[in-house]
Amino acid sequence: MAIYATNGAKLFIGGSMTVDGDDLTVTDFDGETWVEVGETENLGKFGDTSNEITFAGLASGRQRRLKGVRDAGTMEVICGIDYADPGQLALISAEKTIFDYAFKVVLNDAPEGGTPSERYFAAAVGSASEALDTADNVMKLNSTLWINSNVVRVNAAEA
């Protein structure tokens, strides 16, 4: 079993897309034109979790838990600001709309001569704010992606 560093992972944004509630497949992203979001520092976390539904039974005196709807999460993306980066400009533009957009994450885990793992999902860009911290910091673009679909996993493959 192997582990891999996050270093080398890349985020891409595509065009707007309609999400109807059904699980997406990799073919839903065929023909997409991808633009890399440059100068990424942190891609945050994403992936399904189920909401908790609780029931406090009077007779049993026992809390019971059921699984509710699934939520792929909110991805907090941090980039060093690059005013000319097409991907960062696309994030800023997408934040100004009500639409979901196609996203792709490419991991740095390809076997020698093979292809890396990829993750695909649709998300609304909930924020695109600038963080101007103290003197010895890089100015950052912080973007929140509200994932509104399942995350499609494509695993790394041998050559």
Image: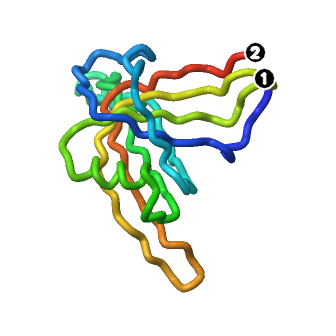
Residue under the image location 47 percent in, 38 percent down: 46
Q: Where's residue 65, x and y in %? A: 35, 26
Q: Which residue is mark 1?
A: 113
Please determine whether, in this image, residue 154 is positioned above or below residue 72.
Answer: above
Q: Where's residue 147, x and y in %? A: 35, 36
In the picture provided, is 31 more to the left or to the right than 97?
Answer: right
Residue under the image location 44 percent in, 35 percent down: 34
Residue under the image location 31 percent in, 46 percent down: 125
User: Which quadrant of the figure contains the C terminus?
Assistant: top right
Q: Is residue 62 visible?
A: no
- In the displayed image of the protein, which residue is found farthest to the left? 98
Mark 1 falls on what kind of element?
Answer: loop
Q: Where's residue 139, x and y in %? A: 49, 72
Tell whether label 2 touches label 1 (CB within 8 Å): yes
Mark 2 falls on what kind of element?
Answer: loop
- In the displayed image of the protein, which residue is found farthest to the bottom? 135
Q: Quadrant of residue 22?
A: top left
Q: Quadrant of residue 117?
A: top right
Out of 31 and 130, give the one closest to the viewer. 31
Q: Which residue is mark 2?
A: 159
Q: Residues within 10 Å of mark 2 (few under 14, many from 20)?
A: few
Please determine whether, in this image, residue 152 is positioned above or below residue 134.
Answer: above
1 or 2: tag closer to the N-terminus: 1
Cα–Cα gap, marks 1 and 2: 5 Å
Out of 48 and 17, give the one closest to the viewer. 17
Q: Name the residue type under label 1.
A: Gly
Tell me which colouring the rendered structure shows.
Answer: rainbow
In the picture provided, is 49 more to the left or to the right than 79?
Answer: left
Residue under the image location 43 percent in, 65 percent down: 83
